[in-house]
Amino acid sequence: MVKKKVEKPRREVTKRQLSHWQQQRRRQRIILGLGIFIIVAALGIVGAGWYVTQYQPLHQIVITVNSTKFDMNYYIKMLKYYGEGQPSYYMSALADEVVRYIEQNELIRQGAMELDITVSNDEIDEELKSYDPPLSKDYRDLVRAGMLISKLRDGSFEQQVPEFAEQRHIRAMFLESKSQANKVRARLEGGEDFAEVAEELSLDEFSKNKKGDLGWRPKGILTELLGTSIPDDYVFGSEVGGLSQPIYDEAKTKRVGYWLIKVLERKEELEEAHVQAILLGSEEEAQEVRSRLEAGEDFAALAEEYSQYDTSKENGGDLGWLTRDMVSPAFGEFAFNPDIELKTLSESIRDDTVVTTGGYWLAKVTDKDDYMKIEGENRDLLKAELLNEWLLALWDNAEIDDSYLDDDNKRWAIEKAIGS
């Protein structure tokens, strides 16, 4: 006998239950939507933060050279390149120099293009490979500038240097005072060897290293080598054979100076001293100023008139409180000597660690040739001089804006360069 299937009665959903389910589903949709919104918002905040703090600053234009623009990312890469292997504190001093390197490299590129001188990317890539280790393509501009300079020097500027010119064979030395120059001149006139005396006494490094023999030179070269036009002007206006009288050069620098020091107070337990001082350019001048101080003239007035040390000149000789590690050994030997009574005026103290200006040249033309070939170092120096004049003209006519790189933005760039 077949059992008859009995259907279960359908459960009726009440309106109240339906309303409850609908509300529950609505709450679930709200919660889900709210969750998605929170996730999207969080991602947006993170993305906006990354954009504002990382992407946007790196792509900010920081240097414009005429129509060419460089962003912060480029500046950081250049900082990293030039600062590689240097201590982190050095980067602060390097920051401004890197700005100038970027600007000059671009000016070279633009100026060379006007002369129809270019370097292809293939040439640059080959040059990049020659470095050990090879440089990445990020540094193409650096290599391009160097290659363009070589082409300019050996092309355009090579053609502008004449083949022949009047040249003089020159001897010279630089001395600290007129009295010293007169004494040395008398020694030379008495037969002493110019080379030996120049090697011993010349305060110009080039002439000292050359033992006074500056070689055959066309006009203008000595100015480049010595950093002053005084000897050049003399030798090309004089005859062969005569030794010059002392020739004054007020702007030439030398690594020597003479201190006059007076210690006003001391704290011996701390090795501190309150000091007045004047820095002079020669022993002769120091002795003259010392005599005037001994005669009662005002220390502050003489410091303001004669001192070649800025702090001394600006503050009437008062250097304030100093410690031994703040001064040279020659200075410290007097200032921190407890056996020297306070307010005692020192004798002139020679200091080979300072730089002063002024001195006297002795020069001699030993031979001349009115039509000598310009070659070797002389030719290279003349080409370099033409290149430098060309670069200066590019700077003078350029429109450059690097105002965005204030101290704060440079610090940010340095942190990125160090950390990358």
Image: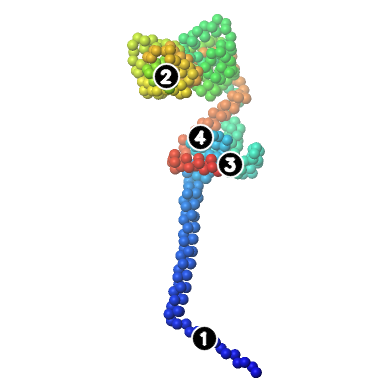
Disc 1 vs disc 3: Cβ atoms closer than 8 Å? no
What percent of the width, then of the height, locates residue 88? 52, 36
Three-letter residue code for mark 2: Glu
**Image label count:** 4
- Structural crowding at the residue carrying mark 4, measured as other residues with C-alpha within 10 Å and reported as few (<14), some (14–19) or many (≥20): few
- The quadrant in which residue 128 appears is top right
In front of the other: label 2 or label 4?
Answer: 2
C-alpha distance separating marks 2 and 4: 33 Å
The label number, if any, that marks residue 268 in the structure image: 2
Q: Name the residue under label 3.
A: 139
The label number, if any, that marks residue 89 in the structure image: 4
For the point 51% across and 11% down, which residue is it?
244
Front position in the image: 359 or 340: 340
Disc 2 vs disc 1: Cβ atoms closer than 8 Å? no
Disc 2 vs disc 4: Cβ atoms closer than 8 Å? no
C-alpha distance separating marks 2 and 1: 109 Å
For the point 35% across and 9% down, which residue is it?
295
C-alpha distance separating marks 4 and 1: 85 Å
What percent of the width, then of the height, locates residue 85? 57, 35
